[in-house]
Image: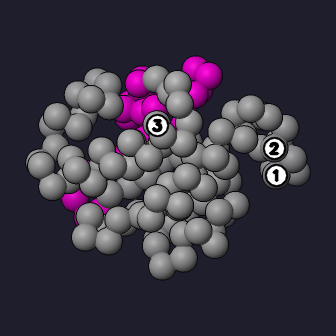
Amino acid sequence: MGTVDDYLASLDPHDRAVVSHVFDVVRETIPGTEQGKSYGMPALLYRGKALISVMRTKKHIGVYPFSGLVPERIAASLEGFEFDKGTIRFQPERPLPDDAIRAIVEARRSEIDDPSIRKAARG
């Protein structure tokens, strides 16, 4: 799988609009992100590290912040959505609010900027 743009081009129009919106909010929140791949998924990178991936699966759209800690740290912003360690799931008919998307990437950016955050949380 290629870049974010390649991935978006492969989606049906409705899913493309929903997934693209998430990436657009991320780019507005954290300017200067770059397209790349991480764990075989198209992703936006920040300072060379995986920031977020958003992908359509058979049953949902998954948001992958490349951190098992992020969903738990921002759980209040995800009320009413399914999430577990490293994955946030939603349906295209009920997309994540922009504020939740911002909380996800801001939490992940904090981990990239200060790796001690992840180490401290692991104890």
The answer to which of marks 1 and 3 sits earlier in the sequence is: 3
Q: Quick check: 92 left or right of 64?
A: left
Report how far apart the C-alphas of labels 2 and 3 lie in the structure. 23 Å
Residue at 63% x, 72% y is 76
Which circle's residue, 2 or 3, is located before the other in the chain? 3
Instruction: Out of 99 and 64, give the one closest to the viewer.
Output: 99
Q: Which residue is under mark 3?
A: 27
Judged left or right of residue 49, residue 13 is left
Which residue, given by chain and number where applicable, does mark 1 sit on? 121
Which residue is at the far left?
12
Left or right, 93 with respect to 11, comes to right
The colour style of the image is one colour
Q: Position of residue 114 (x, y in %)?
A: 79, 34
**Vertical side of 121 occupied by 42: above or below:** above
Quarter holding the N terminus is top left
The three-letter code of the residue at mark 3 reads: Arg
User: Which residue occupies 84% across, 38% down?
Assistant: 116
Label 2 amino acid?
Ile
Say which residue appears at 33% left-offset and 49% top-offset: 21
Residue 60 or 76: which is nearer the viewer? 76
Kindly identify which numbered label has been placed on residue 117.
Answer: 2
Q: Residue at x 12, y 49 (%)?
A: 13
Magenta-drawn stretch, dominant element (helix, strand or loop): strand
- Of circles 2 and 3, the one toward us is 3
**What residue span does the magenta drawing correspond to?**
35-60
On screen, residue 62 versus residue 73, left or right, reads left
Residue 37: say if magenta. Answer: yes
Q: Secondary structure at mark 1?
A: helix
Asked where in the image residue 109 lies, by quadrant, the reply is top right
Q: Are marks 2 and 1 in contact (CB under 8 Å)?
A: yes
SS for callout 3: helix
